[in-house]
Image (cartoon, rainbow, N blue to C red):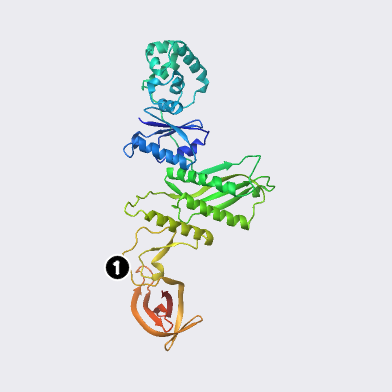
């Protein structure tokens, strides 16, 4: 077994931190609000211990955290290494017996007995675990009963700690509370804290194999008279959920600024939180080693699409995904994300990029073409194409052709038994 112990400098929400590392290993265990244990024994075929530690430090830096790291073959020794920053098990001080007896801090009522045992051993000249192991199991049992015997066997590696099953949260929430004596009255402190909170939100979702499609920013107002007005909520919908945290922050800031400008905040903010309301599956793609700028270009494009969708609304921006159909208005559909499988070019007929929402009926008067308020003269008519509907639908037959007018416009029309209709226009 290879156990990694992380000791944090300040008390933390250990449930959220455990979710961050859940993707790396599902063997996660918590002690109090400062210690996190990870069993990476079954992950060593994917990466080495040094690689895992480097990734862990990068992840913690993204979350705005610092921690001491201990690595050993069992939970108590890893805990001792993290606390004392030592790497020799036999040279650990005798005070670490408390970690071997109760590594998860679940039997604090017996801590006084462990302390008395430690003081008695020190009076006998026992300073390290190496000295402690010079006693036999019979002597330990006679002098210190089951408390000393349990610690003795765990030092020997004969009574490992049983791992507890960890269950991630069903709803991802990140919360920050401002100083009660100085609530904020502008958005700058909120934006400053929001970056780290979005990073942690993304890391927690990634641990579950998810990404955020939509999340709410909830600003709690101080001294709001109406309880319904206490929470000021802004919903953020991401058109492209796999954009970076930096882009998500920019989109969130633009949305918050726009909503606050339309509906000002009436009171100071005492706390705010991020609540994920919609998730989608997350998949990691292999980097293209032969095109280093590909990811940068895609990131710029996704950022542009996300910001435009924020301004115009998520329903105004979409990607057209091709599907098999003979009818032009049915051979594509709206999609929130770009398709990864483009159709072969040689199978696509020559069609205009601009299609009308619905066909418009046109009339011919000699060489003149009339529709709505438009009148133009036909110069040529070419590229006839007969299109039938699918066999399981109502019988439909259209004869398509391209019309070039005197004004230089190239229109795409079709003829049926009901007349002629304008379908689109070539650029």
> Which residue is rendered at x = 43% and y = 41% of the image?
58
> Between residues 127 and 224, which one lies in front from this camera angle?
127
> Between residues 420 and 268, which one lies in front from this camera angle?
268
The reply to whether residue 21 is in sight is no
> Between residues 133 and 128, which one lies in front from this camera angle?
128
In the rendered image, the residue lying farthest to the bottom is 366
Query: From what the image shows, is residue 170 above or below residue 113?
Result: below
Where residue 309 sits: x, y (%)?
A: 50, 60
> Which residue is rendered at x = 40% and y = 54% of the image?
296
Query: From what the image shows, is residue 214 above or below residue 371?
Result: above
Where residue 375 sits: x, y (%)?
A: 47, 84
Mark 1 surroundings within 10 Å by alpha-carbon count, few (fewer than 14), some (14 through 19), many (20 or more): few
> Which of the 4 image quarters holds residue 23?
top left
Residue tagged 1 = 346
The reply to whether residue 153 is in sight is yes
> Between residues 109 and 221, which one lies in front from this camera angle?
221
Q: Quadrant of the N terminus?
A: top left
Say whether residue 64 is left or right of residue 387: right
Where residue 294 sits: x, y (%)?
A: 37, 55
Where residue 185 sits: x, y (%)?
A: 64, 48
Query: From what the image shows, is residue 75 above or below residue 250?
Result: above
Q: Quadrant of the C terminus?
A: bottom left
Check disc 1 and report its element: helix, strand or loop: helix
Query: From what the image shows, is residue 165 above or below residue 194?
Result: above
């Amino acid at each position: 077994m290879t156990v990694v112990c992380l000791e944090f400098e300040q008390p933390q929400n250990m449930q959220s931190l455990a979710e961050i590392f859940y993707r790396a290993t599902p063997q996660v265990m918590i002690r109090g609000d400062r210690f996190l244990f990870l069993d990476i024994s079954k992950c060593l075929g994917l990466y080495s211990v040094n690689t895992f530690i480097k990734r862990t430090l990068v992840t913690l830096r993204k979350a705005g955290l610092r921690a001491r790291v201990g690595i050993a073959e069992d939970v108590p020794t890893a805990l001792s290494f993290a606390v004392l920053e030592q790497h020799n098990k036999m040279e650990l001080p005798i005070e670490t017996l408390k970690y071997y007896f109760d590594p998860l801090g679940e039997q604090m009522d017996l801590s006084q007995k462990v302390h008395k045992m430690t003081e008695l051993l020190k009076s006998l000249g026992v300073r390290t675990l190496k000295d402690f192991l010079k006693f036999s199991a019979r002597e330990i049992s006679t002098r210190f009963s089951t408390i000393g015997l349990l610690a003795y066997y765990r030092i020997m590696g004969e009574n490992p700690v049983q791992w507890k099953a960890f269950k991630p949260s069903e709803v991802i929430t990140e919360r920050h509370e401002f100083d009660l004596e100085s609530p904020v009255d502008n958005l700058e402190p909120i934006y400053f804290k929001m970056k780290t909170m979005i990073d942690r939100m993304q890391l927690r979702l990634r641990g579950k194999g998810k990404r955020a499609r939509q999340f709410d920013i909830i600003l709690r107002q101080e001294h709001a008279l109406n309880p319904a007005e206490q929470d000021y909520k802004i919903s953020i919908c991401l058109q492209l959920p796999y954009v970076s945290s930096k882009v998500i922050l920019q989109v969130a800031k633009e949305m918050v600024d726009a909503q606050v400008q339309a509906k000002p905040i009436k009171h100071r903010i005492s706390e705010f939180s991020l609540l994920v309301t919609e998730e989608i599956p997350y998949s990691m793609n292999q980097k293209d080693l032969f095109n280093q700028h590909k990811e940068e270009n895609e990131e710029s494009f996704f950022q542009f699409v996300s910001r435009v969708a924020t301004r115009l609304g998520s329903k105004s921006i979409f990607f057209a995904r091709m599907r098999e159909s003979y009818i032009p208005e049915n051979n594509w559909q709206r999609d929130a994300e770009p398709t990864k499988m483009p159709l072969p070019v040689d199978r696509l007929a020559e069609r205009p990029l601009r299609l009308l929402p619905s066909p418009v009926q046109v009339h011919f008067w000699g060489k003149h073409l009339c529709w709505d308020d438009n009148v133009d003269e036909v110069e040529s008519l070419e590229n006839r194409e007969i299109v039938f509907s699918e066999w399981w639908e109502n019988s439909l037959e259209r004869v398509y052709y391209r019309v070039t007018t005197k004004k230089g416009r190239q229109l795409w029309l079709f003829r049926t038994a009901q007349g002629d209709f304008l379908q689109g226009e070539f650029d």
